[in-house]
Image: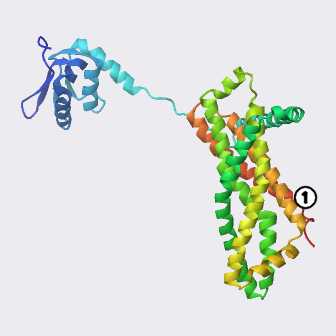
Amino acid sequence: MSNQQAPALNVIGERPSRLAAIGQWQVHALAADNALAGLSRQLRTAARDADMEWDLSGIEALDHFGAQILWNAWGKRRPRHLILSPQHEDTFARIEQAGMLSLPPRSKPHWFSPATLLRVQRNFAGHLYSFVVLIGQLMLDFGRFARRPLRGPWKEISSNIYHIGYQALGITALVGFLIGVVLSFLSAQQLHTFGGDIYLVNILGMSVIRELGPLLAAILVAGRSGSAITAQLGVMRVTEELDAMLVMGMSHGFRLIMPKVLALSISMPLLVVWTDAVALAGGMVAAKVELGLSVSYFLQALPDAVPLANYWIGIGKGVVFGALIALVACHFGLRIKPNTESLGQGTTLSVVTSITVVILADAVFAILFKGVGFY
């Protein structure tokens, strides 16, 4: 830049002041020798004076970068006193026109508008269609597995049982024990008021074995394993592993969906029994502390207080809840698009939908078996 004059600003006079810009106001000159920082400070100071006269006629060369620096210093509008060379007029005119452009306001339709309702209807129909297709493909895979069991995905099934069932024993035991303690404490306080201490076994046994045990285990598995299944399938979609499986002739349903459904259908009843036992143990501890009921009395009274049919209802709930959680998780996992935003949204929707479906299924069980399991 030996033959070119560096960009500079000179203040001439005091009141009224005139700021003269000289030199090369181009990107290569402004970036050299840290010139931009000093010029920016001078421009900010000069812009505070509304009566400042800006003389840009001494600028030898000007590009869009240099013009934009001046334009920003002026507050994105021309100053009242401006002397500008004719060859630089077009540059500032383009910047001025670009600053006036604005995107049209985006109209947000109301939730009750026809367009919104139609979009919701199409979205629901799309989910329903995909879910029905998923169930149909699962039935075909079960038929294929039944015809040739030795060629089935046994490793995938055992692996999913380990990750979904065995590794969930800790969290289900902790939450189940605490729920049993809390439920026993609250029930004992009310029963002691009316002298019905011995009925704590009935309340605790029926509520845990018939309702709370299966529901609690299902909610924990939906949040823990359901989200993991959706995230796993979603990552496989993002990394194009699902497409690679199709190229190699491997079925998604036979190698991914069916093993997870079988594993959850097998693991959930066992987790229900485990959660029931730990929750009742917590209830026994609280009953001993709060009401003085011995453990031996609790164990003796429990079989008479809770009919055997309730155990089978709880185990049946575990099988159904496990299959529903697996199907919902796989459904949302397969619908994830190859981007990270869709992965996060799909995982969240999977957990929320799984818990909602489990609660709805529990309500259906309550209606269907309302006359079963009572004396």
Q: Quadrant of residue 170?
A: bottom right
Secondary structure state at the residue bearing disc 1: helix
What residue is rendered at 90% in x and 61% in y? 369
Where is residue 30? Give x, y as percent.
21, 22
* Front-most of residues 78 and 337: 337
What residue is rendered at 69% in x and 72% in y? 282
Query: Quick check: 97 above or below 136?
Result: above
Q: Quadrant of the N terminus?
A: top left
What residue is rendered at 39% in x and 27% in y? 100
Mark 1 residue type: Leu
Query: Quick check: 93 above or below 153?
Result: above
Q: Is residue 183 visible?
A: no
* Front-most of residues 253 and 196: 253
Left or right: where does residue 57 sit relative to residue 230?
left
Dot 1, crowdedness within 10 Å: few (<14), some or many (≥20)?
A: few
Left or right: where does residue 53 sit relative to residue 65?
left
Identity of the residue furthest to the left in this view = 13
Check disc 1 and report the residue beneath it.
368
Where is residue 255? Give x, y as percent.
74, 33
Q: Quadrant of the C terminus?
A: bottom right
Where is residue 221? Give x, y as percent.
69, 52
